[in-house]
């Protein structure tokens, strides 16, 4: 059974870099059918897609965050990583790691998320 | 890439039906057959209820259904149950492997 676990510091100072890790068990990140993504949710607010990665190295990012975000993969550890630079208070959120389905064929466009991790809360003080 | 538009809240009584709309553009909702819907209870991670506009994952009750007309997708819940009270989010593929979410709708079961 696939399990996803996010981890990282709960508090990041303004202007610093937020670094989170997503550990995956029960499935291999380098399976060709899936993308792996980060999604965040500020307290009491809605979901915001941050970006995603295919194990081949293909990445896609939210245009509004693209200049500050890097998503990478360590296949030897079966882990996904997120780095968000120059953080501010508005980056405070619950950060989710998710698997995005699926590349069924050359025309597929993976677009739905399942399963989700439990999320890790990051606070950036104002 | 702008967020999809959803009503802030909807409500219905047990047994009734409700529909939640999700309006985008021809560059997302109207341009691809890749709209999904998520249910989120307080303190829990979201759960996919509908994918590819109309498809239901195994285990999701058939009371939940999805549809689309032009640039607007809809989630309909028939025969409301108390446990359906939650926040609901739509999501659409938006090209180049990007996706965009709606702002979310709070469903209240009266």
Image (cartoon, coloured by chain):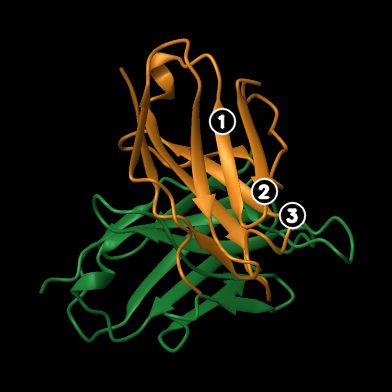
> Which residue is drawn at the image coordinates 66% and 57% (left, top)?
A111
Crowding at dot 2, Cα within 10 Å, few <14 / some 14-19 / many 20+, comes out as few
Q: Position of residue B59 (x, y in %)?
A: 65, 24
Using the rendered image, report if marks 3 and 2 lie on a common chain.
Answer: yes
Calculate the distance from the C-alpha at mark 3 to the C-alpha at mark 2.
11 Å
Q: Mark 3 highlights which residue?
A: B33
Q: Quadrant of the C terminus of chain B?
A: top left
Which residue in the rendered view is the most extreme toward the right?
A: A105
In the rendered image, the vertical position of residue A88 relative to residue A115, given as above or below: below
Calculate the distance from the C-alpha at mark 3 to the C-alpha at mark 1.
17 Å
> Which residue is drawn at the image coordinates 43% and 80% (left, top)?
A64
Is residue A98 toward the left or the right of residue A10 in the image? right
Label 3 vs label 2, nearer the camera: 2
| Along the viewing direction, whichever of B101 and A1 lies nearer the viewer | B101
Q: Mark 1 highlights which residue?
A: B76
Corner quadrant of residue A99: bottom right
Q: Mark 2 highlights which residue?
A: B69
Which residue in the rendered view is the most extreme toward the top?
A: B15
């Amino acid at each position: 059974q696939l399990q996803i676990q996010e981890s990282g510091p709960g508090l990041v100072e303004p202007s610093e870099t937020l670094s989170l890790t997503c550990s995956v068990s029960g499935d291999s990140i380098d399976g060709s059918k899936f993308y792996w993504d980060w999604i965040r949710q500020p307290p009491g607010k809605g979901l915001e897609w941050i970006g995603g990665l295919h194990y081949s190295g293909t990445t896609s990012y939210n245009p509004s965050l693209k200049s500050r975000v890097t998503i990478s993969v360590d296949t030897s550890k079966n882990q996904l990583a997120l780095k968000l630079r120059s953080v501010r208070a508005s980056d405070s959120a619950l950060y989710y790691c998710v698997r995005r389905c699926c590349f069924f064929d050359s025309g597929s466009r993976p677009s739905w998320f399942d399963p989700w991790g439990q999320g890790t809360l990051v606070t950036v003080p104002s | 890439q702008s967020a999809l538009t959803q009503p802030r809240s909807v409500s219905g009584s047990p047994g009734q039906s409700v529909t939640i709309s999700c309006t985008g553009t021809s560059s997302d909702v109207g341009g691809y057959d890749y709209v999904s819907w998520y249910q989120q209870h307080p303190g829990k991670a979201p759960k996919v209820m509908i994918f590819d506009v109309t498809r239901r994952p195994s285990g999701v009750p058939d009371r939940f259904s999805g549809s689309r007309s032009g640039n607007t997708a809809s989630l309909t819940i028939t025969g409301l149950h108390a446990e359906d009270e939650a926040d609901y989010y739509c999501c659409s593929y938006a090209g180049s492997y990007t996706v965009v979410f709606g702002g979310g709708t709070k469903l209240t079961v009266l």
